[in-house]
Image: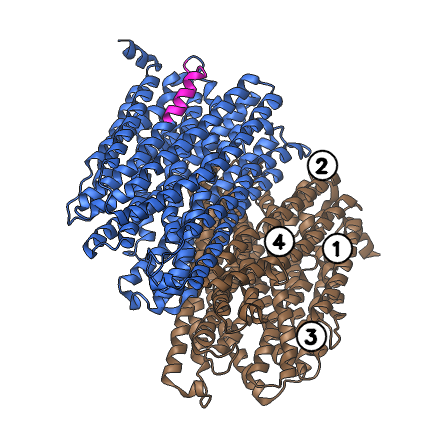
Chain colours: A brown, B blue
Amino acid sequence: MFLAEGLDDGRGWLPVVMVISVLALAVAGWLTSYVLKQDTGTAQMQVISNAIKQGAEAFLKRQYQTITLWSAVLAVVIFLGYYFGKGDAGLAWHTTVAFILGAICSGLAGFSGMFVSIRANIRTASAARTSLNKALQIALRGGAVTGLSVVALSLLGVGALFYLFGGLDNPKEVPFQIVGFGFGASFVALFAQLGGGIYTKAADVGADLVGKVEAGIPEDDPRNPAVIADLVGDNVGDCAGRGADLFESTAAENIGAMILGVVLFQHYGLKGILFPLVARAFGIIASIVGLMIVKTGEDEDPMHALNRGFYVTTLLAMAGFYVAVNQLLGNNLWFFAAGVVGIVTSFLFVFITQYYTEYRFRPVRSIAEASRTGAATNIITGFAVGLECTALPVITISVALLLSYYFGLKAQPGGGLFGTAIATMGMLSTAAYILAMDTFGPITDNAGGIIEMSGQPEDVRARTDRLDSVGNTTKALTKGYAIGSAALAAFLLFSAYMDEVSNLTKQAFHVVNIGDVPVFVGALLGAMLVFLFSALAIKAVGKAAYSVINEVRRQFKENPGIMAGTSQPDYGTCVDIVTRGALKAMVVPALLAVSAPVIVGVVFKNVRFEGSSPLAGAEAVAAFLMVGTITGILMATLMNNGGGAWDNAKKFIETGQYGGKRSDAHKAAVVGDTVGDPFKDTAGPSLHVLIKLLSTITLVAAPLFI
Amino acid sequence: MFLAEGLDDGRGWLPVVMVISVLALAVAGWLTSYVLKQDTGTAQMQVISNAIKQGAEAFLKRQYQTITLWSAVLAVVIFLGYYFGKGDAGLAWHTTVAFILGAICSGLAGFSGMFVSIRANIRTASAARTSLNKALQIALRGGAVTGLSVVALSLLGVGALFYLFGGLDNPKEVPFQIVGFGFGASFVALFAQLGGGIYTKAADVGADLVGKVEAGIPEDDPRNPAVIADLVGDNVGDCAGRGADLFESTAAENIGAMILGVVLFQHYGLKGILFPLVARAFGIIASIVGLMIVKTGEDEDPMHALNRGFYVTTLLAMAGFYVAVNQLLGNNLWFFAAGVVGIVTSFLFVFITQYYTEYRFRPVRSIAEASRTGAATNIITGFAVGLECTALPVITISVALLLSYYFGLKAQPGGGLFGTAIATMGMLSTAAYILAMDTFGPITDNAGGIIEMSGQPEDVRARTDRLDSVGNTTKALTKGYAIGSAALAAFLLFSAYMDEVSNLTKQAFHVVNIGDVPVFVGALLGAMLVFLFSALAIKAVGKAAYSVINEVRRQFKENPGIMAGTSQPDYGTCVDIVTRGALKAMVVPALLAVSAPVIVGVVFKNVRFEGSSPLAGAEAVAAFLMVGTITGILMATLMNNGGGAWDNAKKFIETGQYGGKRSDAHKAAVVGDTVGDPFKDTAGPSLHVLIKLLSTITLVAAPLFI
């Protein structure tokens, strides 16, 4: 009765969201205990698994120390900036607390995901000795812990802040006060993705170059001193990094959509503002059901099983979306249509990513063919494929933006931008499932490594190989999905920024005129930032990899027993070298990303020309943000898909094409794969985070530009 | 007396420009006869030179056939579009005639430059047998023919059209009627640069991969069947291609600046409109003097000699600029200051390009060092350097744009954009000298090839090697200069487009709001076009190179006498294969570039939303153009400098570093060099042209968008 009344005026929907989120965390806890109950295999397997666990935990501990330090510095800067800059103590406290909570939740999501995945790997490996289905379920449920924690923590954090800051009574102001949460999440995500991405690829490139190419030993061979560092990298990069990435996506986009809901307050009241949270909460339920029904036969392609779960999740999410529109947006079916646009967009992105990264199709085959004439033509062709593969995603996003904008306008005059926000909500409603599939990747990758290193029989290895290959596909698809949702959400975040500026100045700000010289210069600098940031990320990998290579060479040289198999290599030193290298290298690009938009805003606020607008600073930053985002989307797509295509061109040759393994074509393809590694696992994913960090930092720093 | 009066009211300055241009052509004719009078060396040298000449002429003939065909089609489209679309027969004729004249002049400039350079190569080689100074002078004067023809033909064409269309009596309308000239020039330049760029790198990559890497024979070895195709490529790519590129730059920027002059008509009248032509004409005189004084001692670094000429040219050009400001712009020294900004910018670009592409500095050395761990780390590091090297040029351009805008506003209220135009004029006032230095590159490269292939003694080879190495530097500098001037000119061309739209609709158009969804989508598509276009250009090289490689392998296999040196390879087939491949491959990217902005404009004119502006189509195109330009500048810089850095990292190792020639590091560096080839000589330079083509086509097609 009380709830029903609350649902009518909107207030009751916040507890609904919170309860669903807590339930999702409970499910995550149950899944954790399910995973931990499983068999942990032989003693030899445990030795390897423990080495991975120790390495990952040591890295995470040191990484979080660095992040905590920088977050504390930034929290002080934010507080002082708002306190003295805006002279508003209440807003200063709110923004700072929101920032800290965002940073903590993000760290928690990354940590809990990795906590499970470094324990699920050995259990998956052990289960693979008897049953493919069992192994699949353990890996996926381990991944689901990340997926559910990320989405639920983001909803809980945003919902709690909204409630605590008095959002139920003051719903038009409070969404602007929780932008700090999004910035905190992005800030931690940037460090997590950069640090993890540098770690994973420095270890991988280092291990491959000396192991496969120079010493001629296979991947995951226990004689390679960098092999444990490589396996640790899968966890800290793909698992902790991607988790933080998607945590900040969901956080930033929820907040942005709530801000857009403020614009429609006269029509939908509190319900319009809470709609994004409710739609996301229904999406969690859909994801839980989808995850629980996944089951594979011993002879089935495990990808089919994952796809079945995804279809169920999508259908349920669509139904949930309908209910949310029906209950909160006056059953306005144009809004539902906008949500469907988002869901269809996510399907198209998955398909396009497959086309450009799987060897069933022309692009990857062309790279494999070019490998016959050597590494140079392999690289040239792969780079061309990477450049080319940006076209279809951009066209898809363009159509989706225009369509959802159109549907929004149809639904409600002036609701065009809210339409694009709803499309983003639609696209992200399956986020928990997608993220579970993504974390499935490093778990099966690790399981394969453990099986390989502990010398299990061939048929067990065949099982983990099948799971590992599915994991590679799901990792690629998630990256396509992440960049697609970032692109679709970009506009929503720009608008939130512009609304924030309007809100602060109490004057309309809806024009970003790049026909104006200073604004154009802002745009030019935004695009340049993406290039420079990518350069720093890639260079960091090169530098860290270089030190790993030297260490492995040193061990091979000083201890010939390693290659003979009579003595154990020193895994710990390699882990240590990569950890130090990655943490050192992540600071400069992260600080560049954080400071660049602030510098641009402050400089252009003060560089004034005759007749320039009083909002010139805010406008230059908007152009910086928008064109930086455009360039970032293109560059990230190039890096992700180009890297994936190189990887699979090598795998295609390994199936026996063009001479198969050990042929000259294969050697050329290994070069391409190695070049693609920092593209697809360091720079590309870090650019996702960069794009959203630019949005959240401009939201938080907006008072400085006006 | 009559002239003095004409100079007072501005009318007399047009004849001054025309006379200077005709004189410059006369000097070019005299230089041609000077070159042709020189000794043509031994019979063996002539055999090689004739093979190059035949290959280059055959390519140019077939290329011009293709270009003529497409130009004719486009001329009809333009005429019909203006005739039926605008219903203005006079404007239709004017635009079509201007287009055709622009295309013809551009073709003529490319042809005359190449005519001399394929004759100067052997004469430079012959002179190198006795005197370094003589060889330097022949090569530079051969290059000067291109430089002078390009700038003079551009001034003559624009000046003649302005006069014929009645510009002296109707100066506020006529600049808009000659935009077709710029588009004709860009259109031909795109084909010339793409076709030539694909040709030169397909031949180079093909020759290197099979010759150097597989067969282990040195560069320019006569046993390599692709060696003549490679030498032909230097002429058709660097010489004819770059000539057409800079022709369209000078044409488009002259016209754009004249259009901006219209805005200031009330202050400076006809003089403001003719100022760009006069400043450029004075620049020609400065360049002629600079070119004639170049002289080197036998033991001097020839680069110093070229630099002396450049300093003299710059000083004289600055003096000429001062006179032009004094005579035509009321001696307004703020405008002179804007011009100085442009000249300083060109110096900074030259310095930055050197820093990133010469092995005296850190970036190239880091690539060389990374080659020690193989091709993969060489590529990763080189790519990172390419990404990083975009930062300083962008910052330089940003400061130059803001400063010249500020000086323009100081000079005249509302004159900010004219200030940026004047900075562009300043930067381009030395264009003829720079272009001469650029064409010097392929001439000395060819001369070196002829010396090598005809087995001249070591000391002669040392002389041509010194000239060739200077040629490599000047080629890199010209590319930096070309992209810098394109970036500085970009804003001038955007403004011309916006003025054109205002002029056509008689309503103010000065806002391009990328905060509006359709406009943002236009921007997104513009950035994407750059990626897709680069992909097509690079793929074309890969495809054409692949066929060359197969042909060379076939010849080596079927005729073992070639490697033994007992029988002659079949050079002609290789030349033929590359010609066909390059011409076929250039059509798709060229048509994409021409059609994309038109499609965007027409679609967005018709996709209308509630409350969208009546100029929505024109606005989306403006965003497409601006963000496409931004992305193009960055991508071109990445490709040009990255490619140059890879090239010189290889050269650095060849000086004996890291094991020198034939070491593993050297092999890795050769891979990097090969990857960089299509970047720096095909995709990069084609992007310069693309950027300006987008500007000129939007100018011409503007009536379709409104």
The residue tagged 2 is: A413
Residue extending furthest toward the top: B1
Of residues B156 and A202, the one nearer the viewer is B156
Please tell me how crowded label 3 is: few (under 14), some (14-19), or many (20+) other residues with Cα within 10 Å.
many
Residue B642 seen from this side = no
Of residues A683 and B484, the one nearer the viewer is B484
Residue shown at the point (60%, 27%) measured from the top left: B706
Residue type marked 2: Pro
4 or 1: mark nearer the eye:
4
Residue type marked 4: Gly
Badge 1 marks a residue whose secondary structure is helix
Does the magenta stretch mainly form a helix, a strand or a loop? helix
Badge 3 marks a residue whose secondary structure is helix
2 or 4: mark nearer the eye:
4
Disc on the earlier residue, 4 or 3 = 3
The residue tagged 1 is: A13
The residue tagged 4 is: A484
User: Where is residue A550 shown, x and y percent of the image?
Assistant: 38, 74
Residue type marked 1: Trp
Q: Output the chain of dot 4.
A: A
Q: How far apart in space, not on screen, are marks 1 and 3 (Cα)?
A: 36 Å
**CB within 8 Å, label 4 to label 3:** no
Residue B348 appears left or right of B605: left
Residue type marked 3: Leu
Disc on the earlier residue, 4 or 1 = 1
1 or 2: mark nearer the eye:
2
Q: How far apart in space, not on screen, are marks 2 and 4 (Cα)?
A: 27 Å
**CB within 8 Å, label 1 to label 3:** no
Disc on the earlier residue, 2 or 4 = 2
1 or 3: mark nearer the eye:
3
Q: How far apart in space, not on screen, are marks 2 and 3 (Cα)?
A: 49 Å
